[in-house]
Amino acid sequence: MTDIEEALALLAAPCTDERFFQRALKALALVTQCRWAAFGRPSEVAGKAEVVAFCDLKHTVPGFEFDLEGSPCELIYRQKYPDTHLLFAKDLQTKFPNFQLIKDLGANSYQAELILDDGGHPIGHILVMDPLPQTETMKSKEFFRLLAQRIGVEYKRLLISRELALHKQMIAVTEHLMSFVDDSYTYHVVSKGYESLFNKSSQEIVGKSVEQVHGKVVFNDVLKPLLDRTLKGETVQTRIWIHPPHTAPQYMNILHNPYFNEKGNIVGVIVSAHNITDMHAANEKIQQLANHDPLTGMLNRRALFEVMEGKLREQEQAKLQLAVLYIDLDGFQQINDRYGHHQGDKVLRYVASKIQDTTIDSEIVARIGGDEFIVLASFPHGNTYEHYQLQLEDLCDRLNSQLFIDIDIEGQSLPLSASIGHCLVNDATMELSAIISKADKDMYRNKRNERLGLVSMATGFIRQTPSQ
């Protein structure tokens, strides 16, 4: 396994806690061939920075704080988008003679990338240092940029997770929504929480039926089935939306317990509910951040691999035939280099929309990095190999046609096209990376043939201009 492959494997491995940052930094150290890698952020103390995670390929180093003044990290926070990369290839100690950490480590070179939030404000940075000089390459610089984006997403996820933990503690000490409902669905006791939720005093709720308080539709479709199960002796815990008449819908975690009288008969239901609307929204945001590319909204590599695993299981069960398309844009790098990442990101968003408009609901689309996209196509099981190949080639032709376009940037009309490789999965037990690799190799073969003039996938296509 090459350093790049090992790095990608480290990043693709699922991880839901702070261990992700150590994995990411190890991947960065592998790609850049540097001894030290770190993820830092501005400290709450003015003039200082905090190292959240530090990777030393030889020793374990805990997080720490340091003074930004006189350090190379001070300069990375002066960078502005799109110039978010910084390199000191050698003579680091000479350039920063008063920064003790460099001397303690014996570092001679430094490379860093700024991490920005959605508003373009810095939230941290990643860096590598090494005793030897460093050489910047497009591969390492691009990996820096992609990793900075991924760490930014995972760091937001971590912060939201911490907020969720705080929400749970707050819920534990706030007033519950508690009530007693008899076997005729009438409220006998309600807590203060009901008064706040329905903007009524307890006297206005007690003696009313659940249907009168919540409305006929919610009662019949949602609440009555839960109460009926509990009145038969079952303890029911569920999460449902309720729709109070004077406020927005609320997402509730509700526990229904049967209430027995002295004779052992069930005469009602004790209801205990927590309002978890904010927690539900935060959970959905976490899932969005964890599974989607922040630029295009498409699935990311992590989510793609999860979907592929499910599709391969379905193929093993003879439910479908899976195919993978690997899309790489031609001419995108020149746009990025000439006009900057801001314009490049606009192009990527436009291309992503073209791909999604061309595919159908059963086809899964993901962005796996840079200008590379994956399409998972699922065909009905039971047809011949030749039939599948024709369907796959038709999809490639449609995508090629839609991506043979002119991009208008700063008054200049620039050509853009795509090279597409595909792999019809013959063995559902293959490794996911091997399947992607086959489609990738087919794409590079097509790209090479196009450059040599052996194949012109775009022949006969009419170049499109995006609507402004």
Image (tube, rainbow, N blue to C red):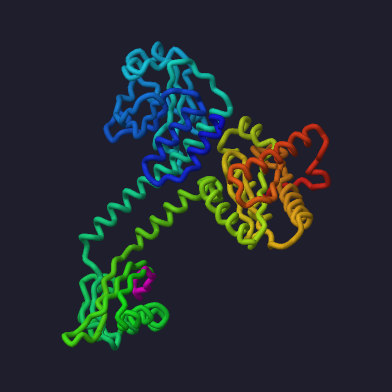
Q: Which residue is found at the position 27% from the left and 52% from the top?
A: 166
| Residue 169 relative to residue 241: left or right | left
Q: Classify residue 250 by image quadrant.
A: bottom left
Which is more toward the observer, 447 or 89? 447
In the image, residue 319 above or below residue 327: below
Q: Percent from the top left, x then y, of residue 421?
A: 70, 43
Which is more toward the observer, 191 or 383? 383
Q: Which residue is found at the position 32% from the left and 53% from the top?
A: 164
Which is more toward the observer, 329 or 380? 380
Q: Determine if the magenta segment contains residue 256.
A: no
Q: Which residues are magenta?
A: 239-247
| Residue 441 relative to residue 131: left or right | right
Quadrant, the N terminus: top right
| Residue 411 relative to residue 103: left or right | right
Q: Classify residue 153 by image quadrant.
A: top left
Q: Classify residue 40 by image quadrant.
A: top left
